Image: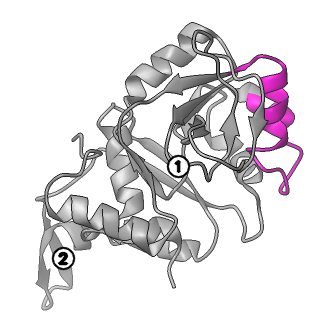
Amino acid sequence: MRPKPMVEIGDRPILWHIMKIYAAHGINDFVICCGYKGWMIKEYFANYFMKMNDVTFDLEHNKVEVHSTSKEPWRVTLIDTGLETMTAGRLLKVREHLNNETFCVTYGDGVSDVDISKSIAFHREQGGAATMTAVQPPGRFGAFSLSEDDPRVRNFHEKPQGDGAWINGGFFVFEPELFDHIEGDKTVLEHAPLERLAELGKVNAFRHYGFWQPMDTLRDKRVLEDLWSTHQAPWKIW
């Protein structure tokens, strides 16, 4: 078994796909909250040049020459945030690496062609503490109330029944104020922090009408695999 962010679509972990989406919008500084088998993620980046490039091994002189054919302008910080830590608790553990400024967050198991640059601009225009990407897939995720002409999220409900509601698609933009509402390791981002900020009128939704697909099941993985292998992956914006 491997951590979900390391499950491959094509021959690349879904984590790589997510990072490529952000990098396409000029975001190249990443902090990864590691949990279950986080060492596998660390090993992936430790061996990134070996996996992605041609190399020459000079065994006589104990040297390795990397012939760079694939590289990324990324700075990747990997932090062990624990096996049992909840989503908001993981963010709290990496706070010192976020430089007390606006930051983006998303889950490690979903891809989209969301315009992240526009979502950040929208976040700044609205002046709230949190912006989430709103999508409309089948109703099996956390939904929230969103009126037609008001971007503010009035309330937040985890995993309601029924279809058709706007749901939390991840791809968040946050202000450091978020941390004022995180008590510790057991705090779930989608519960107290977002619920409280929504009550204060500080959560906005950036509506995304395009592609969004989580990888929750084997069927989901096959859908993503088929799109990638047939060169029809909408999230490949790079």
Q: Nearer the viewer, residue 3 or 66?
A: 3
Looking at the image, residue 183 lies above or below residue 50: above
Residue at the (24%, 40%) spot, across then down: 237
Give the labeled residue for mark 2: 64
| x, y percent for residue 149 | 58, 9
Please state which amino acid type lies under the numbered disc 1. Answer: Pro
Residue interval drawn in magenta: 178-203
Left or right of 32? Residue 54 is left
Looking at the image, residue 9 lies above or below residue 18: below
Left or right of 210? Residue 41 is right
Residue 204, image quadrant: top right
Q: Nearer the viewer, residue 142 or 105?
A: 142
Residue projecting furthest to the front? 162
Residue at the (23%, 51%) spot, across then down: 233
| x, y percent for residue 1 | 51, 85
Give the labeled residue for mark 1: 138
| x, y percent for residue 94 | 67, 48
Element type at marker 1? loop
Residue projecting furthest to the right? 183
Left or right of 6? Residue 32 is right
Element type at marker 2? strand
| x, y percent for residue 118 | 41, 20
